[in-house]
């Protein structure tokens, strides 16, 4: 269990003016070791050179305090409310936290951040506290000296960030940041998690990544949307080749994250006998993006193109309360591949001067050709759950990629579909290495018939998902391969009105 963190927003709001300080600084304990000493504090020291500028400092409070991070300077409030900090300064400090978090990512350029007015942001205190907690998490990973304090604070902050209240605040913060900044935020956080896991993994047997990934869901009129981000190192390994990958290849495979967007359209039709609730795929996108810049990948990695690729995506959509559900209907799956069989006979004759006999060779054989799309889509039903599955197949033997391994011949064959898979004209992925499934190509709608007593009510729906990522060699010659899997679950809502 995570030890509760203090309400920093409340503490900052109620800081007295400098004239009322009884000490040379104001401090708030953020995190302690098991013995309570040393600790990590958020501190505002008096500026003896200038009383017009102050800064927040994150300090590892040993016998000799170590400064881990310092905010931009701010001016104390000049109004008569007897408070040190006004609302504008709190807002600027909030933006300072966000810039500091993004700076820990591979993109060192400071992006332009623009938010609505402060008074229009609901739950600002939760969002403010979450941003500071996230910054503290990264500061402990990168800046804190090794020891019990560092490991204890990292674990406590990790558990706090995974808690219900933090997840609720994360959803609000991600919506406030917008999609572009959200991606930079998640890459920065997941880069820190990947580095932290890299420290722990060699020293623990049967290591299981102790860090959750992030997902969120939004329910709006006519649209459901789920977003998720997960560092590759946080995904469970389902199968892998026993011989280890080279150090450079390990670096390339580790320093990536999976990014997923799932969008569904929903519609309610009220008929004479029942209500029909229709859900259709708008867009399913899955990308595998690097967490470090090109120069770092070139220096320490095998190649930016040596990375995992999506090999299976499974989604399950379920109404959580089913007493008024009458039936479920699904659309058709992809057609089975066409297989053509024919006889191919040939006669070969050759004459060798050293052999007075005519060498006559006759061969007859049967050949089969298969017309197979790399991705096959299937719909199925379990109770009142609609299952949507996308499977990637090996075009050479037709096997599902997520549960199989490439043959040694295919690994050495430069014309195999998975070699140069991001540049080939026949690639099953985008050039960036992801996949996009649009509703006009994969699957018709699924629909539930519901009793008319549900009119005017809000129904809760669960979307569970599983994503498999597989690594087969791309440009390098290696027999190493592996498949990893992540699972997520989100709750969405639908108001039953015409």
Image (cartoon, rainbow, N blue to C red):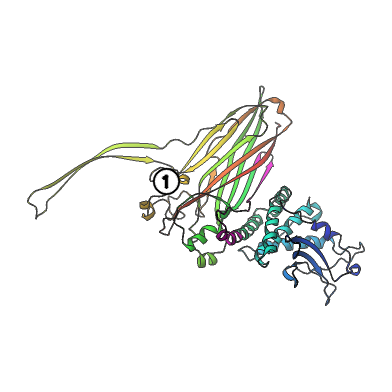
Q: Is residue 216 magenta?
A: yes
Query: Which residue is under mark 1?
Result: 394
Residue pushed farthest left? 356
Above or below, 116 relative to 326: below
Could you say which quadrant of the image residue 78 lies in?
Answer: bottom right
Q: Is residue 431 magenta?
A: no
Q: Is residue 476 left or right of residue 229?
A: left
Quadrant location, the C terminus: top right
- The percent coordinates of residue 469 (x first, y second) are 52, 49
- The percent coordinates of residue 254 (x first, y second) are 54, 58
Q: Which residues are magenta?
A: 196-224
Above or below, 431 relative to 22: above
Residue pushed farthest bottom? 49
SS class, disc 1: loop
Residue 111 at least partly seen = no
Residue placed most toward the observer, 208 or 85: 208
- The percent coordinates of residue 327 (x first, y second) are 61, 26
């Amino acid at each position: 269990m995570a030890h509760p963190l203090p309400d920093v927003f409340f503490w900052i709001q109620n800081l007295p003016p400098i004239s009322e300080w009884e000490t040379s600084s104001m401090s708030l304990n953020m995190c302690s070791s098991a013995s309570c000493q040393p600790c990590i504090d958020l501190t505002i020291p008096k500026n003896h050179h200038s009383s017009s500028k102050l800064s927040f400092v994150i300090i590892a409070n040993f016998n000799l305090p170590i400064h881990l991070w310092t905010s931009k300077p701010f001016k104390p409030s000049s109004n008569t409310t007897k408070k040190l900090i006004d609302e504008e300064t709190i807002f600027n400090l909030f933006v300072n936290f966000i810039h500091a978090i993004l700076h820990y990512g591979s993109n060192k350029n400071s992006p332009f951040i623009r938010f609505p007015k402060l008074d229009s942001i609901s739950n600002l205190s939760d969002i403010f506290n979450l941003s500071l907690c996230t910054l503290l998490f990264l500061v402990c990973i990168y800046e804190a000296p090794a020891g019990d304090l560092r490991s204890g604070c990292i674990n406590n902050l990790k558990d706090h960030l995974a808690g219900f209240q933090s997840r609720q605040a994360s959803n609000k913060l991600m919506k406030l940041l917008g999609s572009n900044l959200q991606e930079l935020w998640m890459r920065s956080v997941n880069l820190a998690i990947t580095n932290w896991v890299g420290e722990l993994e060699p020293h623990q047997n049967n290591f299981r990544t102790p860090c959750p990934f992030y997902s969120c869901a939004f329910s709006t009129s006519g649209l459901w949307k789920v977003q998720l981000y997960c560092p590759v190192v946080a995904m469970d390994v389902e199968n892998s080749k026993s011989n280890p990958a080279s150090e450079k290849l390990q670096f390339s495979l580790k320093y990536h994250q999976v990014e997923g967007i799932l969008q569904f359209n929903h519609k309610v039709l009220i008929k004479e006998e029942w209500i029909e609730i229709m859900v259709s795929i708008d867009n399913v996108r899955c990308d595998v993006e690097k967490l470090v810049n090109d120069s770092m990948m070139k220096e320490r990695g095998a190649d930016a193109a040596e990375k995992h690729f999506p090999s299976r995506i499974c989604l399950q959509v379920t109404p959580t309360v089913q007493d008024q559900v009458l039936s479920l209907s699904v659309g058709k799956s992809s057609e089975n591949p066409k297989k053509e069989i024919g006889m191919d006979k040939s006669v070969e004759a050759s004459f060798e001067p050293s052999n007075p006999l005519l060498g006559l060779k006759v061969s007859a054989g049967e050949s089969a050709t298969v017309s197979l799309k790399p991705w096959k889509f299937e719909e199925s039903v379990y109770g009142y759950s609609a299952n949507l599955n996308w499977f990637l197949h090996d075009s050479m033997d037709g096997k599902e990629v997520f549960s199989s391994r490439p043959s040694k011949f295919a690994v050495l064959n430069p014309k195999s579909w998975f070699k140069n898979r991001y540049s080939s004209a026949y690639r099953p992925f985008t050039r960036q290495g992801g996949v996009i499934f649009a509703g006009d190509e994969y699957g018709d709608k699924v629909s539930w018939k519901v009793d008319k007593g549900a009119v005017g009510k809000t129904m809760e729906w669960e979307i569970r998902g599983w994503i498999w990522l597989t690594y087969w060699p791309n440009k390098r010659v290696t027999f190493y391969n592996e498949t990893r899997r992540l699972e997520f679950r989100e709750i969405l809502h639908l108001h039953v009105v015409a």
